[in-house]
Amino acid sequence: MTSEPYNGYTNWETWNTALWIYNNKNLNDTIVERAVEIALDAKNDRDMTTYDMRVAIERMLKEVLLHDDPTEGWVSDLFHSAVERVDFTQIAELLIDECVRRVEL
């Protein structure tokens, strides 16, 4: 199976994961809070911030995968597709941009 762009994202898996992050208030708040911490720790090093954020998002979502009810939600939607196909770097970059916008307001 080839990976094709989907709704402006790397692929369907990345789009779906980002959708669940943005639509789940608790998950979004947790990830955005972590993104702010990472951005402050990185001291304006965008590459390091992106890498650290990617790792943090991937870890958090894999914990959800291990503990969530597989009959509904994010786990169910991604069950038939490989989590490894998710472009966590793209999601990290989008979340960092969102954090920057929030700080600028």
Image (cartoon, rainbow, N blue to C red):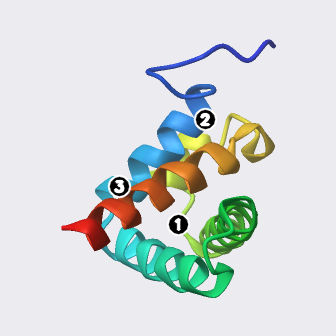
State the separation of the CA atoms marked 2 and 1. Answer: 19 Å
Residue picked out by circle 1: 69
Looking at marks 3 and 1 on the same chain, the residue that comes earlier in the sequence is marked by 3
Kind of residue at badge 1 = Asp
Is disc 2 surrounded by few (<14), some (14 to 19) or many (20+) residues within 10 Å? many
Is disc 3 surrounded by few (<14), some (14 to 19) or many (20+) residues within 10 Å? some
Tell me the residue at 57%/27% (across/down): 12
For residue 51, side relative to residue 30 (left or right): right
Residue 93, relative to residue 31: is it above or below? Answer: above
Tell me the residue at 60%/80% (across/down): 38
Residue 44 visible somewhere in the drawing: yes
Tag in front: 2 or 1: 2
Residue 50, relative to residue 87: is it above or below? Answer: below
Q: Secondary structure at mark 1?
A: loop
| Percent position of residue 77, x then y | 52, 41
Residue picked out by circle 2: 13
State the separation of the CA atoms marked 3 and 1. Answer: 19 Å
Looking at marks 2 and 3 on the same chain, the residue that comes earlier in the sequence is marked by 2
| Percent position of residue 82, x then y | 76, 39
Q: In the rendered image, which quarter contains the N terminus?
A: top right
Which one is nearer the viewer's eye here, 34 or 78? 34
Which one is nearer the viewer's eye here, 39 or 92? 39
**What numbered label is drawn on residue 20?**
none
Residue picked out by circle 3: 22
For residue 18, side relative to residue 23 (left or right): right
Q: Residue furthest front?
A: 44
Q: In the rendered image, which quarter contains the C terminus?
A: bottom left
Kind of residue at badge 2 = Glu
